[in-house]
Image (cartoon, grey):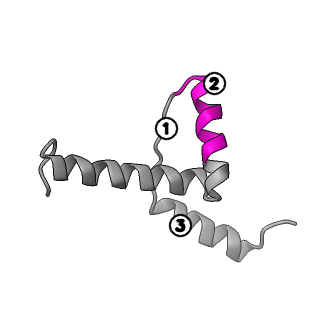
Amino acid sequence: MAKSDAQIKADKKYRAKQEFLQARVSPEEKETIVTHVQKTGESLNNFMRRAFAETMERDVASGKAKKD
């Protein structure tokens, strides 16, 4: 099904407000990560955002990083 003009416009507006991150992993690491994420039922993007947030929270709690 083709996107309507309104959907295309909304998508462009949303993407303009977002940044893009990439990570390089081995094929084996990717398979392990994707398999795990599929078991959680969440998207890879949401999993990565949660992993970043939880890691940053732990780093602040342990004193490894200062809280802003």
Question: How many other residues sit within 10 Å of disc 2, few (<14), some (14-19) or many (≥20)?
Answer: few
| Comparing labels 1 and 3, the label whose residue is closer to the camera | 1
User: Which of marks 1 and 2 precedes in the sequence?
Assistant: 1
Q: Position of residue 58 (x, y in %)?
A: 26, 50
Quadrant of the drawing holding the C terminus? bottom left
> Horizontal placement of 51 versus 38: left or right?
left
Looking at numbered disc 3 in the image, what kind of residue is underneath it? Tyr
User: Is residue 26 covered in magenta?
Assistant: yes
Residue 37, relative to residue 3: is it above or below?
Answer: above
- Label disc, if present, on residue 14 of the rendered structure: 3
Mark toward the start of the polypeptide (1 vs 3)? 3
Region rendered in magenta: 25-36
Nearer the observer: mark 2 or 1; the answer is: 2
At mark 1, the secondary structure is loop
Residue 22: image location, x then y, percent: 49, 38
Residue 1: quarter of image: bottom right
Local packing at callout 1 (Cα closer than 10 Å; few below 14, some 14-19, many 20+) is few
Q: Which residue is mark 1?
A: 22
Q: Which residue is mark 2?
A: 27
Report the residue at 38% width, 49% height from top: 52
